Amino acid sequence: MSKAPAGVALVRVDNRLVHGQVLEAWLPALDAHGILVADDEAAGNVLARSAMSLAIPPGVVFEVLRIAAAVELLKPGGKGPRATRTLLLLRDVRDAVALHEGGVPMPQLNLGNVHFAAGRKQVSPSVFLDAGELSALKCEDHKSWVRMHFTSTGDLHIHALGIDAVPRRWAEATPTPDAPSLLVPADEKATAARLVDFVAVK
């Protein structure tokens, strides 16, 4: 699995771009100190850029770039974002595909909010995708997911987990308390799940 571009803590598709959930939840959870919006529409609209910049907390580096400029910044050999841990925000899945096709490594993609429109199918409570977007996201391998756990002291532990090659063959198994599954992987090419990132929020 390719690594995310240096300095990028998370790539998130959210057609609201900069808003309260991003500022109040995602920045602290990721321990991110920068926001990079890669969006042609916002980059070409002074009012949109100004409105977003007014919401940015002090000390957070904020950039808005066109997709082509973001590709040059983030692809291997590029300068990378100005902050050491940056949240990369995209308006829709097609922008993520454009970055990836431009050479930007993207081992994970967080789908946050993609609003309903004609021809879109609901894939989660807040994400609606059309046929082209669903097709672009299809990939048998390189799956990732997030597990969250509140400790007895009230801390939030967030584990980002990933698997590089998913099993394609399975064998029956006898469930045990530690391994309750009825099936286990029987594919020598499959890889075990691994910890991609961990964040503790106190």
Image: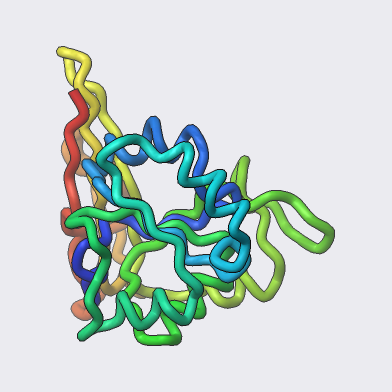
The residue drawn where x is 21% and y is 29% is 201
Q: Residue furthest right?
A: 118
Query: Compared with residue 117, is residue 156 higher up or lower down, i.e. above or below?
Result: above
From the viewer's perspective, tell me whether residue 140 is left or right of residue 200.
right
Measuring from the top left, give residue 124's x and y in whole percent.
59, 46
Between residues 62 and 11, which one lies in front from this camera angle?
Answer: 62
Task: Name which quarter of the figure residue 128 lies in.
Answer: bottom right
The residue drawn where x is 50% and y is 80% is 98
The residue drawn where x is 24% and y is 71% is 80
Query: Compared with residue 18, is residue 80 higher up or lower down, i.e. above or below?
Result: below
Between residues 6 and 162, which one lies in front from this camera angle?
Answer: 6
Regarding residue 186, the answer to whether it shows in the image is no
Measuring from the top left, give residue 5's x and y in whole percent.
25, 71
Regarding residue 120, the answer to whether it shows in the image is yes
Colour convention of the picture: rainbow
Task: Name which quarter of the figure residue 187 lies in.
Answer: bottom left
Between residues 48 and 4, which one lies in front from this camera angle?
Answer: 48
Quadrant for the C terminus, please: top left
Query: Compared with residue 112, is residue 164 higher up or lower down, i.e. above or below?
Result: below
Quadrant for the N terminus, please: bottom left
Measuring from the top left, give residue 35's x and y in whole percent.
36, 52
Query: Compared with residue 202, is residue 52 higher up or lower down, i.e. above or below?
Result: below
Measuring from the top left, give residue 158's x and y in whole percent.
25, 38
The residue drawn where x is 42% and y is 78% is 69
